[in-house]
């Protein structure tokens, strides 16, 4: 295999010209560096509650019953409230301003979490943290779709998603280290120090965003891009966007356009369901299992679930690389792999009499569920590539509807009081995997159907143009 072939597999389509290669190098460096660090702190500040819960917060705040689940549900409600408004704000406010501003706000709220005296105060903080953190995930996927071609998008989306998973992994490692070295220092518990350190990490990255983030190609004034590179960035994706559908203020025409197509409903349903396949990892079921059965230290309870996240990172990168390398840019096989992985994991955990090693295997292979996240949003970017405004709404809606379900799903199927077995949750996971396969087929079919109809319309347009040209020639001859 040639170097060009290897480069395509590892990093997506290879630019044809030197100018495009230089442009891609710059946007990779500045867009991915900030977006990945921003999302890293997003998940670091989000997942610290689950690590704090099993590291002393539960006892210090006198938490009982399903209050841990309620904290996550309240955060999710804030996330839902902030989802579409945040993405629409990117249409009217510079992303270079909006992203870092929201990051500063949730960083400040993370600091506040270190000083809570009761769980009610944490409820309030987590709600507003959800509102501000909602700016990051779908907003970044919108930005990535504005700069990258289809053959470049999968790997970048995967790297971005992995940065959040690294934040989750790092939070567990950091909590274990903080508990070991800072617990009791200055009269503060280790879990309180975790919130302080996470806030300290967050703020400098926000300042970096103010300096380097380039907005979108049509509005960028980044100091590191030449005028020629700005024009090239627009031209690279211009052929995929229809007139009147580019970045700009939302109108009622946009609402009618979005709601009259299958894309909004299909993509929203796909992530609303498939996103729940992440429940074994996102609810830290492994950590709750280890704490409930006893025999493990606080450090081990923080460290061992990191393996779930590590599998998620590896699976996401492999799947993203594969989807970019395939000619058809097929995304659906990744969702099939994810559904199979969580089904196997659930069956292993339902067989409760099995050895402890089997349970470790089950939780770790369930980490593959994270690979569907990047793929699903890259797929939606691909489907809506011809309409930037629709793309912004669809991406936001996908995450919003997933969080609408996630607001109550764990309270029913993954309650803290169900530890260590979570039997009903395992049955729910099998049902979710089956539903994911059905919706994946629906979206695949509708995308193929739309391309086929578009191709037929294109043929008719060409025939009509030829007829008009012949008529004009005949008139000229007369």
Image: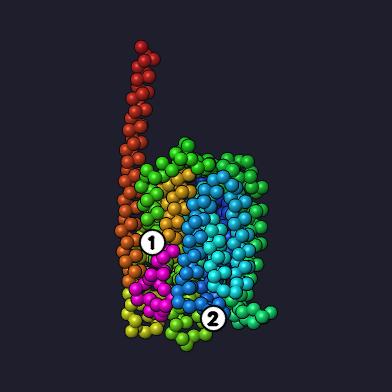
Q: Residue at x 61, y 60 (%)?
A: 105
Q: Residue at x 40, y 72 (%)?
A: 414
Q: As rendered, which of 84 and 220 lies closer to the eye?
A: 84
Badge 1 marks a residue whose secondary structure is helix
Tell which circle, 1 or 2, labels the residue nearer the N-terminal end.
2
Q: Can residue 187 be spotted in the picture?
A: yes
Counting from the top left corner in percent of width and height, residue 288 is at 46, 78
Q: Can residue 141 be spotted in the picture?
A: no
Q: Residues within 10 Å of mark 1 (few under 14, many from 20)?
A: many
Q: Which is in the foreground here, disc 1 or disc 2?
A: 2
State the residue lying farthest toward the top.
478
Counting from the top left corner in percent of width and height, residue 38 is at 58, 60
Tags 1 and 2 touching, CB below 8 Å:
no
Q: Which residue is mark 2?
A: 59
Counting from the top left corner in percent of width and height, residue 334 is at 38, 61
Q: Residues within 10 Å of mark 2 (few under 14, many from 20)?
A: few
440 horizontally vs 388: left or right: left
Q: Which residue is mark 1?
A: 274
Q: Residue at x 33, y 30 (%)?
A: 463
Q: As rendered, which of 19 and 319 lies closer to the eye?
A: 319
- Answer with the quarter of the image where residue 342 lies: bottom left
When the figure is inspected, residue 368 is found, relative to residue 82, above or below; the finding is below
Q: As rendered, which of 313 and 277 lies closer to the eye?
A: 277
Task: Write down the region rendered in magenta.
Answer: 405-425
Magenta portion: prevailing SS class: helix
When the figure is inspected, residue 283 is found, relative to residue 225, above or below; the finding is below
Quarter of the image with the C terminus is top left
Q: Was residue 43 drawn as part of the magenta stretch in this picture?
A: no
Badge 2 marks a residue whose secondary structure is helix
Q: CA distance from mark 1 to mark 2?
A: 34 Å
Quarter of the image with the N terminus is bottom left
30 horizontally vs 478: left or right: right
């Amino acid at each position: 295999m040639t170097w060009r072939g290897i480069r395509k597999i590892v990093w997506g389509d290879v630019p044809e010209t030197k100018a495009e290669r230089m442009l891609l190098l710059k946007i990779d460096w500045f867009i991915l560096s900030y977006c990945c660090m921003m999302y890293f702190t997003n998940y670091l500040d989000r997942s610290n509650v689950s690590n704090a819960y099993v590291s002393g917060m539960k006892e210090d705040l006198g938490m009982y019953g399903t209050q841990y689940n309620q904290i996550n549900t309240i955060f999710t409600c804030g996330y839902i409230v902030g989802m579409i408004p945040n993405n629409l704000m990117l249409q009217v406010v510079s992303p270079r301003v909006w992203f870092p501003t929201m990051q500063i706000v949730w960083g400040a709220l993370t600091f506040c979490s270190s000083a809570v005296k009761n769980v009610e105060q944490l409820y309030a903080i987590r709600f507003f943290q959800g509102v501000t953190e909602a700016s990051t995930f779908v907003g970044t996927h919108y930005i990535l779709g504005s700069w990258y071609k289809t053959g470049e998008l999968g790997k970048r989306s995967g790297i971005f998603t992995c940065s959040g998973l690294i934040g989750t992994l790092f939070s567990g490692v950091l909590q274990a280290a903080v508990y070991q070295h800072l617990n009791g220092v200055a009269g503060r518990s280790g879990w309180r120090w975790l919130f302080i350190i996470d806030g300290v990490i967050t703020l400098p990255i926000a300042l970096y965003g103010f300096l380097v983030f380039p907005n979108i190609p049509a509005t960028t004034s980044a100091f590191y891009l030449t005028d020629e590179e700005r024009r090239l960035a627009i031209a690279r994706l211009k052929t995929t966007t229809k007139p009147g559908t580019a970045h700009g203020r939302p109108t009622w025409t946009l609402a009618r356009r979005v709601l009259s197509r299958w894309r909004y409903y299909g993509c929203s349903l796909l992530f609303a369901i498939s996103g729940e396949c992440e429940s074994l990892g996102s609810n830290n079921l492994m950590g709750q299992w280890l704490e409930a059965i006893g025999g493990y230290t606080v450090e081990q309870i923080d460290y061992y679930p990191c393996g779930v996240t590590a599998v998620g990172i590896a699976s996401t990168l492999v799947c993203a690389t594969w989807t970019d390398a395939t000619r058809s840019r097929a995304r659906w096989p990744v969702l099939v792999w994810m559904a199979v992985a969580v089904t196997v994991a659930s069956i292993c955990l339902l067989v409760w009499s099995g050895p402890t090693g089997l349970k470790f295997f089950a939780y770790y292979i369930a980490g593959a569920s994270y690979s569907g996240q990047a793929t699903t949003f890259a797929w939606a970017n691909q489907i809506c590539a011809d309409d930037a405004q629709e793309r912004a709404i669809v991406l936001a809606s996908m995450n919003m509807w997933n969080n609408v379900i996630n607001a109550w799903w764990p309270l029913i199927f993954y309650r803290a009081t169900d530890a260590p077995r979570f039997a009903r949750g395992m049955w729910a996971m099998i049902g979710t995997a089956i539903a994911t396969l059905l919706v994946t087929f629906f979206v695949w079919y509708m995308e193929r159907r739309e391309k086929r109809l578009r191709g037929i319309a294109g043929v008719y347009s060409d025939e009509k143009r030829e007829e008009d040209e012949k008529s004009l020639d005949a008139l000229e001859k007369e």
